[in-house]
C-alpha cells in the first residue's frame, strides 16, 4: 500500500485490501481511456416520496411537504450551479484605469545580502534554524564563516542586515499597499466588481468571491479595496493562561482561495491588542480620507491604480463582535431584535438594521457631559464607548460589517448546543461510539471535532427511543434542518436559488425545534448565534460566500504569529519582542518572494502510478480480498466488451457468452489505493487523506446515468499481453478495473431525515458482483448501519458491513457528498 493513483475527482483515498503479504512490485504504467459501462444497470432513481413517509413512527403530526416536483427542481438548480460554476455569464463594469509600469534593474537580486549563500543561511536561521545564541555559537566555530563565505559573523550582524530592509511598518495603509503590491498575487488581483450569472437570461445570479457582491456597485470607476479585519483571542501558553489579541488584515481583491491558505501569506498581523495602538500614525485625517479621495496603489506588475481602501468586514467570534460594535451581550450586533425574540423564525420576528445615524449622533454627545453621553448611548442601543475606530471611517456601517462565522457561530455555537440537547434527549444506555469514549463526555471540542461529529450525528439517532414513547419525527427534522443549513451555508458558490434552500433549511429547524421544549431540555431558544443565522442570506449577497470571512482561515495564523512569536521571547515584556521577531521573519519571507519572482521559478508535480503488488494470483484474490466471483465477473466484463456497441442482451445470454471466455492468465497487478485530486462544489480546496487501517471501502459509482453504492474488493489491471487475446481490436480496455459488490439502487429518501436506505443485493444466496472501470468510481461513500433501538454489541467497524442488513447513505460526510446526494 505504498503508492497512490491520481485522478481528477475528489482528493481522498480508497483502500481495497485486507493486508495481504507484499509480492513483487511493478514498474510505472500509463492510464488509458476507460470503458464507460458497468453492470448491473442502475434502476431509475425515484424522486418521489412515499405518501406516508415509509417507516416513520410519527402518526400524530402532518408531514413536511416533499413534493417530487420540488425535489426535482432543487436537483436541477444545484446541477445548473455546478455546470456553470467554472464558466459563468460575467457582466463586467466598464470603468478600468491602469497607469504605466516601472522597471527595476538590480545586479544582485539577493541584496542587501552580499551573495546567494548569505541569503540562504539567513533564511534558514530565521525560519528554520536554532535560537540566536545557538546560531552565533555555530558561526564562532573556527573557520566556518570564512569557509562558507558569509559576510556576517553572528546573529547581531545578521539582524543588522535584516533590519536594513525598508518593507513596511504597521501603518494600515502601508500594510494594504504591501498586499496589493505582492508579486505573487499580481495575476490574481481583481480590480472591478462583476455580476456572475448561471444562465444566459441573467436571471440566476451567482455569489462566490468578494468581487461578485453588491458592496461597491454604487461607485463605478473606482478601484475599491475592501479591507477585511479579523480578531480572535488566543492562548499563547499551555499552563500560565497568557493570552493575546492578534488583529489580522487582508483585502478582498485577493481571491478567497488564496486568502484562506496561510501558506500564501495573504494576511498581515496588524496589531496585538490592547498594547499596539498604531501611535506612530500621526496624521489621522489621512487614514480617514483615503477611502473617499483614493490613493495610488502599485500592484506587483508595476501598474498603478487609483485605489480606495474601505473597511468592509470584521471577522470574529461573538464576544469580539460585541466588543467592536459596542452593543450589549445577548443582543444581535447586526439588528435591533429584542433579546427575548432571538429564538424566533424569520416569519415570526420583526427586526430592522441598527440605525447607524442614531449611533453616530449618540457618540457625538461626548462633549455634552458624561451623563448626557451615557443616556444617548443607551437610547441608541450601545454601550458608552469613546471614539470607536469605525466612527470617522467613510462609507462604513459597522453593524453591516459584522459577518457570519462558520467556525464559531455554527460548529462551536449551534452544533455545540445541539450536541448538548441531544445528550439530554438520549437515554442513559444509548452509547455514541464514533470517538473512543463517546462524544457526550468530551470537553473543549475543536471545530474539527465538531465537524467530524456532524458527519454521523443524524444517522445514529434515526431509531432513537424518546422518553414516554414520544415520536422522534420532530427531533429528526430539527436535526436535519440544522445540519442542512450548516452544509448549505458552506457552499463555495451560491446562486439566488440556493439561498432559498438555505432559508428553507433554517425554517425546517424552527418548525420542529419545540421538541426540545417538550422533552424538558430547553425553555427558549434566545441564542444570538441562532438568530444571526437569519442574516446569512443577506450577508452572502453583500460580501460573497462565507469562506470569504471565516475565522477558521486565521486560526492557523495564531500558531505562526502569536504562539511561535511568544516562544521566541524571554516571557518578559513579550509583545515588543514578539513584534521584533515577527518583523524580521516577515522581511525574510517577503524577500524570498522577491527572489523567487526575479528567478522566475516554477513548480512541478510528479504523480506515481505503480501497482502496489505486481503479481497476485486469482486464487489469492478470492481468499485474501474476498472477491469470491472474480473469474465469473471478469468473464462477463470481457464478454460484454466483445459485443457490438449497441447490442442488447439478457442476463442469461450474457452468462452464456461469459461461459465461453477463457482467461489466459493466473496473476494480475493489484492496486491498494486510489487518490483523487480535489474537487469541491466549485472545484476548490483539498481534502487531506490520513493513513488508515486496511479495509474494503464503499464507494459511489456513476457511469453517467445515476449513482449507486458498491464495495470495492480489489483494483487490478489486465496483463498487457492478454489484451489482444481477450478483446476485439476496436475496443481498448481501461488500464485500471475494480471488482465491486453491489448495494441496492437508490429509492426515495425517508421524509424525516432524508437519507437513502440501501442493502446488499443477494441473488441465489450470492452477493451480486461486477468488474467495472475504476473511472466509474466517483468517490468514497460512508454507510451508517441501521442500529435499531439497541446497537448489537458484536458489531465492530471490521464486520459491520457483513453483519448489518441495511444501511443509510451518509450525505453529511463532507460538502461534496452533501451536494451530490441531496
Image (spheres, rainbow, N blue to C red):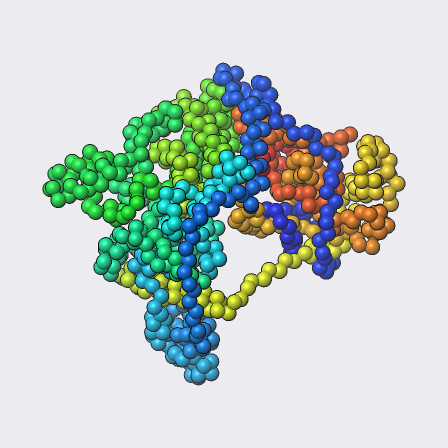
Q: Is residue 817 left or right of residue 612?
A: left
Q: Residue at x 51, y 29 (%)?
A: 461
State the residue in front, 647 or 784: 647
State the residue in front, 359 or 156: 359
Residue 747 can be seen in this image = yes
Q: Is residue 386 left or right of residue 730?
A: left
Q: Residue at x 42, y 58 (%)?
A: 98
Q: Residue at x 84, y 47 (%)?
A: 728
Image position, residue 191 (x, y; %): 43, 52
Image position, residue 547 (x, y; %): 45, 45
Q: Is residue 697 left or right of residue 569?
A: right
Q: Based on the displayed image, in which of its 4 quarters is residue 108 positioned?
A: bottom left
State the residue in front, 370 or 663: 370
Q: Height in image: 475 above or below 629?
A: above
Identity of the residue furthest to the top in this view: 60
Figure quadrant of the C terminus: top right
Q: Height in image: 737 above or below 538?
A: below
Q: Height in image: 177 above or below 807?
A: below
Image position, residue 81 (x, y; %): 54, 38
Q: Residue at x 72, y 60 (%)?
A: 27
Identity of the residue furthest to the front in this view: 94
State the residue in front, 434 or 575: 575
Image position, residue 348 (x, y; %): 36, 24
Residue 478 can be seen in this image = no
Q: Height in image: 481 above or below 681?
A: above
Count of residue discs: 0
Amino acid at each position: 500500500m505504498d503508492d497512490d493513483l491520481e485522478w481528477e475527482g475528489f482528493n481522498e483515498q480508497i483502500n481495497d485490501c485486507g493486508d495481504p503479504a507484499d509480492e513483487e512490485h511493478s514498474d510505472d504504467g500509463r492510464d488509458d481511456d476507460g470503458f464507460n459501462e458497468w453492470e448491473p444497470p442502475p434502476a431509475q432513481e425515484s424522486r418521489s416520496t412515499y405518501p406516508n413517509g415509509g417507516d416513520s413512527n410519527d402518526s400524530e403530526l402532518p408531514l413536511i411537504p416533499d413534493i417530487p416536483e420540488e425535489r426535482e427542481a432543487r436537483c436541477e438548480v444545484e446541477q445548473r450551479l455546478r455546470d456553470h460554476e467554472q464558466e459563468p455569464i460575467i457582466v463586467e463594469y466598464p470603468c478600468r484605469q491602469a497607469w504605466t509600469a516601472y522597471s527595476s534593474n538590480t545586479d544582485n537580486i539577493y541584496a542587501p545580502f552580499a551573495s546567494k549563500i548569505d541569503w540562504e543561511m539567513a533564511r534558514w536561521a530565521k525560519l528554520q534554524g536554532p535560537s540566536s545564541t545557538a546560531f552565533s555559537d555555530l558561526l564562532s566555530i573556527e573557520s566556518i564563516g570564512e569557509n562558507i563565505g558569509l559576510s556576517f559573523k553572528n546573529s547581531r550582524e545578521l539582524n543588522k542586515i535584516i533590519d536594513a530592509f525598508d518593507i513596511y511598518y504597521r501603518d494600515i495603509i502601508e500594510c494594504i499597499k504591501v498586499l496589493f503590491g505582492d508579486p505573487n498575487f499580481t495575476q490574481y488581483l481583481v480590480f472591478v466588481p462583476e455580476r456572475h450569472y448561471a444562465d444566459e437570461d441573467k436571471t440566476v445570479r451567482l455569489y462566490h468571491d468578494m468581487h461578485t457582491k453588491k458592496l461597491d456597485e454604487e461607485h463605478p470607476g473606482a478601484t475599491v479595496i475592501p479591507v477585511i479585519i479579523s480578531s480572535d483571542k488566543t492562548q499563547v501558553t499551555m499552563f500560565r493562561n497568557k493570552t493575546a489579541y492578534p488583529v489580522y488584515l487582508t483585502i478582498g481583491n485577493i481571491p478567497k482561495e488564496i486568502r484562506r491558505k496561510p501558506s500564501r501569506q495573504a494576511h498581515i498581523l496588524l496589531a496585538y491588542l490592547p498594547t499596539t495602538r498604531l501611535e506612530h500614525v500621526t496624521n489621522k485625517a489621512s487614514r480617514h480620507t483615503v477611502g473617499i479621495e483614493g490613493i495610488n496603489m502599485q500592484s506587483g506588475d508595476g501598474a498603478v491604480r487609483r485605489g480606495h481602501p474601505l473597511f468592509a468586514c470584521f471577522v470574529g467570534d461573538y464576544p469580539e463582535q460585541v466588543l467592536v460594535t459596542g452593543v450589549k451581550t445577548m443582543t444581535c450586533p447586526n439588528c435591533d431584535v429584542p433579546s427575548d425574540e432571538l429564538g424566533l423564525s424569520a416569519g415570526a420576528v420583526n427586526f430592522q438594521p441598527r440605525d447607524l445615524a442614531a449611533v453616530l449622533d449618540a457618540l457625538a454627545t461626548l462633549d455634552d457631559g458624561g451623563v448626557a453621553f451615557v443616556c444617548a448611548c443607551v437610547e441608541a442601543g450601545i454601550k458608552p464607548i469613546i471614539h470607536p475606530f469605525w466612527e470617522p471611517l467613510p462609507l462604513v456601517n459597522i453593524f453591516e460589517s459584522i459577518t457570519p462565522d462558520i467556525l464559531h457561530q455554527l460548529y462551536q455555537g449551534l452544533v455545540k448546543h445541539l450536541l448538548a440537547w441531544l445528550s439530554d434527549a438520549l437515554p442513559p444506555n444509548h452509547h455514541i461510539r464514533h470517538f473512543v469514549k463517546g462524544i457526550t463526555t468530551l470537553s473543549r471540542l475543536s471545530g474539527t471535532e465538531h465537524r467530524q461529529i456532524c458527519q454521523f450525528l443524524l444517522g445514529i439517532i434515526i431509531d432513537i427511543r424518546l422518553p414516554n414513547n414520544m415520536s422522534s419525527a420532530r427531533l429528526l427534522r430539527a436535526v436535519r434542518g440544522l445540519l442542512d443549513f450548516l452544509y448549505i451555508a458552506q457552499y463555495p458558490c451560491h446562486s439566488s436559488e440556493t439561498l432559498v434552500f438555505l432559508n428553507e433549511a433554517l425554517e425546517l429547524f424552527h418548525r420542529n425545534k419545540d421538541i426540545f421544549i417538550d422533552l424538558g431540555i430547553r425553555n427558549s431558544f434566545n441564542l444570538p448565534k441562532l438568530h444571526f443565522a437569519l442574516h446569512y442570506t443577506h450577508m452572502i449577497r453583500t460580501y460573497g460566500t462565507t469562506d470569504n470571512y471565516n475565522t477558521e482561515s486565521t486560526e492557523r495564523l495564531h500558531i505562526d504569529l502569536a504562539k511561535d512569536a511568544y516562544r521566541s521571547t524571554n516571557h518578559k515584556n513579550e509583545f515588543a519582542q514578539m513584534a521584533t521577531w515577527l518583523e524580521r521573519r516577515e522581511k525574510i519571507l517577503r524577500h524570498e518572494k522577491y527572489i523567487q519572482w526575479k528567478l522566475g521559478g516554477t513548480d512541478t508535480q510528479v504523480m506515481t502510478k505503480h501497482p502496489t503488488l505486481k503479481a497476485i494470483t486469482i486464487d489469492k484474490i478470492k481468499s485474501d480480498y474476498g472477491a469470491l466471483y472474480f473469474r465469473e465477473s471478469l468473464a462477463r466484463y470481457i464478454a460484454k466488451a466483445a459485443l457490438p456497441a449497441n447490442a442488447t442482451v439478457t442476463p442469461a445470454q450474457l452468462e452464456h457468452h461469459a461461459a465461453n471466455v477463457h482467461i489466459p492468465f493466473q496473476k494480475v497487478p493489484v492496486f491498494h489505493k486510489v487518490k483523487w485530486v480535489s474537487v469541491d462544489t466549485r472545484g476548490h480546496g483539498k481534502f487531506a487523506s490520513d493513513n488508515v487501517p486496511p479495509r474494503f471501502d464503499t464507494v459511489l459509482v456513476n457511469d453517467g446515468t445515476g449513482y449507486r453504492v458498491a464495495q470495492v474488493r480489489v483494483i487490478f489491471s489486465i496483463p498487457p499481453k492478454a489484451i489482444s487475446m481477450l478483446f476485439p481490436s476496436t475496443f481498448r480496455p481501461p488500464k485500471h478495473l475494480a471488482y465491486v459488490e453491489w448495494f441496492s439502487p437508490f429509492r426515495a429518501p425517508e421524509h424525516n431525515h432524508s437519507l437513502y436506505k440501501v442493502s446488499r443485493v443477494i441473488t441465489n444466496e450470492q452477493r451480486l458482483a461486477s468488474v467495472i472501470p475504476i473511472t466509474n468510481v466517483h468517490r468514497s461513500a460512508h454507510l451508517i448501519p441501521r442500529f435499531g433501538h439497541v446497537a448489537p454489541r458484536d458489531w465492530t467497524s471490521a464486520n459491520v458491513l457483513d453483519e448489518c442488513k441495511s444501511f443509510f447513505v451518509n450525505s453529511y460526510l463532507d460538502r461534496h457528498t452533501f451536494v451530490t446526494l441531496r
